[in-house]
Amino acid sequence: MEVIGYISSILIGISLGLIGSGGSILTVPVLVYLFSVDAVAATAYSLFIVGFTAAIGSVGYFKKGLVNIKTALVFGAPSIVAVFLTRAYIVPAIPKEVFSVGDFMVTKSILMMLLFAILMVVASFSMIKKDKKKKEEDLGPQKFNYPVILLEGAVVGVVTGLVGAGGGFLIIPALVLLSKLPMKEAVGTSLVIIAAKSLIGFFGEGGETVIDWTLLTSVAAFATVGIFIGIYLSKKIDGAKLKPIFGWFVLIMGVYIIIKETLLK
């Protein structure tokens, strides 16, 4: 299972490098089901893996001038604050036994996996649906809808803090629609935002998670290899064409996790 886990770790990076999102959606299931990491710890591990991988991937976009610093700061600031507070205070405050339905006890780990699965289902629809193609020149001058961008940044931060997902599938559409960034610039800027908020969220842990640094750095290393492969493939393959296929895979995984954590328990 570990061999499959490391292969899957490469796929996490490939997804981030190729389509700019989706990789973090795979991270928690890979850690929980292939490496037998506790669900709560897996959300913390995911923050580091996704943050580190996104940081490496963003370097190439910086070199090409495809990172909008102002947008990263406006969107990223509330997101970073939200993810830090969520990991430091909200996650530790969730009881180990949340509630019960008949004989079925919903524990903290089950709740985390169910939240993650719901996020996967939501993310899958955003990947499957066809994007309305817009020419970059039709986007118009960049403008900021500050209240909406700040609010969305905070929401993405809370989601990231709770389930350990980078939220690229939420960030990229927001940057294109709300900040009028061209798609490639939105991907580069998204990677910077994901890196900053994920790593700060990881180091803002409340202290209840014992870190297996050997496993963590190994998975991060394989994911980093994957992101370089993904960036290379992005020059050869149109990531937009692969996005719906990946979306269907994420949808099936999300439904599987919901069934596994409820009906099969």
Image (spheres, grey):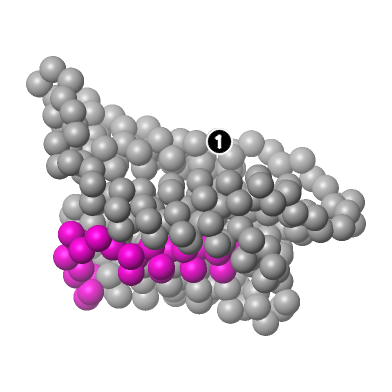
Give the residues drawn in magenta, as a range: 190-215
The answer to which of 122 and 83 lies nearer the viewer is 83
The answer to which of 126 and 225 lies nearer the viewer is 126
Q: Is residue 242 left or right of residue 167?
A: right
Q: Is residue 134 left or right of residue 62?
A: right
| Residue in the picture at 29% in, 43% down | 112
How many marks overall? 1
Q: Amino acid at mark 1?
A: Phe
Query: Can residue 226 be seen in the rendering of this structure?
Result: no
Q: Quadrant of the N terminus?
A: bottom left
For residue 206, what is the image quadrant? bottom left
Tell me the SS state at disc 1: helix
Magenta stretch holds residue 54:
no
| Residue in the picture at 71% in, 65% down | 185
Q: Is residue 109 left or right of residue 63?
A: left
Query: Can residue 146 be seen in the rendering of this structure?
Result: yes
* Residue 111 position within the rendered picture, expressed as x and y whole percent measured from the top left: 26, 37
* Residue 227 position within the rendered picture, expressed as x and y whole percent measured from the top left: 50, 70
Magenta stretch holds residue 214:
yes
* Residue 49 position within the rendered picture, expressed as x and y whole percent measured from the top left: 37, 67
Q: Main secondary structure of the magenta part?
A: helix
